Image (cartoon, rainbow, N blue to C red):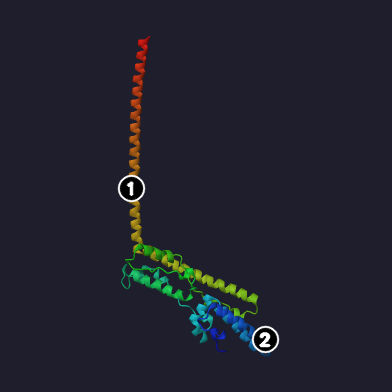
Amino acid sequence: MPKKRCYYQVMGLSMDATEDDIKKAYRQLALSLHPDKNIDNEEMANNEFKLLQEAYEVLSDPKERKWYDKHKDSILCGQNRDEIVDKEVDVYPFCSSFCFTSYTDDENGFYTVYRNLFNTITDEDIPFRDGDVKDSEEQPPFGDSKSPYSDVHRFYSYWMSYCTSKPYYYLDVYQTSDAPNRRVARLIDKENKKIRDSAKKKRNEEIRSLVEFVRKRDKRVAKNRKLLEAKAEENKRKTELVRKQQIEARNKELENYCESEWTSMAKLEDDLKEIEKNLDKDL
């Protein structure tokens, strides 16, 4: 088996090469290595050109490049892509109250155990982030038992919509470099993407289920819920008091109105009697 060559060396680039550097190097090498320009040694030219295309496909894709950078040494030592598995923490054991001993900040306490767990998950994702707005967003820390609820709320808001940054390239069943033509290469890409997307979805669901489990047992969340319930009860009491005061005020206004009406009617009757008396005198 021929020794594997570093993709950066194939393209004559350093590991800190920019996207523009990669594109420029590919254009130049593609012209010089193309089989049509090396008809005297067609087999070697085909192999070199195929390797160049393979290197460009990997290095021009930000996520695939990050994965390659992380595992480059293993690849150059002879490991195949499907033999390289990105380690990821198994979160299933943490979906149990047996994984912590108390709701404290002790070494085996709730807040220390889950703070370390979420830090580990974050560390696993960091190498594969693109640096876009969402990925570069500062992840709120899990905190400890004394963290203010505003920080706790930010943490859960972020993690309830968790999306892994891992590309899961090691799950690829086929390699596009093995495709006989572009049509087959596109079909291979499509099938590989389906497998990767399925793995990402599974991981996202695992982490979100973990977050929901932790949130339901977080005493900081329970404490805030009780405060909100107490505040709601107090607001309800105040609202009822205001309603009663408004009813009493309306009833008082109605009483005053009725009394005023009665007084007016009595005065009207007196006036009518006085008019009748005066008419009788005139007659």
Residue with the mark numbered 2 = 37
Q: Nearer the viewer, residue 270 or 208?
A: 270
Q: Is residue 53 left or right of residue 206?
A: right
Residue with the mark numbered 1 = 238
> In the displayed structure, would residue 82 be above or below residue 159?
below
Q: How many marks?
A: 2
Q: Is any atom of residue 36 visible in this view? A: yes
Q: Residue at x 35, y 13 (%)?
A: 278
Q: Name the amino acid type tagged 1.
A: Lys
Tell me if mark 2 has few (under 14), some (14-19) or many (20+) residues whose alpha carbon lies within 10 angstroms of its own.
few
Tell me if mark 1 has few (under 14), some (14-19) or many (20+) residues whose alpha carbon lies within 10 angstroms of its own.
few
Furthest residue to the bottom? 40
Quadrant where the C terminus lies?
Answer: top left
Q: Residue at x 51, y 72 (%)?
A: 199
Q: Name the amino acid type tagged 2.
A: Lys
Q: Residue at x 50, y 78 (%)?
A: 66
> In the displayed structure, would residue 54 be above or below residue 140?
below
Q: Nearer the viewer, residue 203 or 241?
A: 241
Rendered location of residue 90, percent (x, y):
43, 73
Q: Which mark is residue 54?
A: none
Rendered location of residue 183, percent (x, y):
65, 75
Q: Secondary structure at mark 2?
A: helix
